[in-house]
Image (tube, helix red, strand yellow):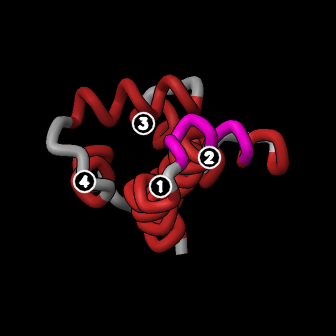
Amino acid sequence: MYAKLIQLIELSLQKVGHLKLDSDTISRSHKRYFGTTLSDLREELLVEKAKEYLREGQTATQTAYSLNYSCLDAFSRFFKKHAEMRPSEYLRQLLERNE
């Protein structure tokens, strides 16, 4: 589900040119009506999908590649920025809860 939503958002942003509107206008309108920009929504969905993969037992590296990151460091920075912890810390918390 998350992957399809992310693809839809990316496709929508790519097709904005056909509407003679720039992506900033669309993003501002989305923020006005939904309280978040399309970019923020995409990032939120990516973080939730990453957490899902990690809960299912994927490693941070597997999760990064599943989300089309070619570099684990870039994924780790993205995850930390949005989840306020590194993927390894998130995995550690999951393990502690399950003990």
Q: CA distance from mark 3 to mark 4?
A: 16 Å
The percent coordinates of residue 71 (x first, y second) are 17, 36
N-terminal label among 3 and 1? 1
Q: Which marked residue is nearer to the observer: mark 3 or mark 2? A: 2
For label 2, the residue is: 26
Residue density around tag 1, few if under 14, some if 14–19, many if 20 or more, within 10 Å: some
Say whether marks 4 and 2 touch (CB < 8 Å).
no
Residue density around tag 2, few if under 14, some if 14–19, many if 20 or more, within 10 Å: some
For label 3, the residue is: 87
What element does badge 3 sit on?
helix
Question: Is residue 51 found left or right of 72 in the rendered image?
Answer: right
Q: CA distance from mark 1 to mark 2?
A: 8 Å
Residue 16 is labelled as 1
Type of amino acid under label 1: Val
Residue nearest the viewer, comparing 44 with 26? 26
Residue density around tag 3, few if under 14, some if 14–19, many if 20 or more, within 10 Å: many
The percent coordinates of residue 89 (x first, y second) are 48, 30
Type of amino acid under label 2: Ile
Say whether marks 3 and 4 touch (CB < 8 Å).
no
Name which residue lies at 62% across and 46% down. 26
Q: CA distance from mark 3 to mark 1?
A: 34 Å
For residue 74, say whether it is visible.
yes
N-terminal label among 4 and 2? 2
Question: Is residue 61 found left or right of 41 in the rendered image?
Answer: left
Q: Which marked residue is nearer to the observer: mark 3 or mark 4? A: 4
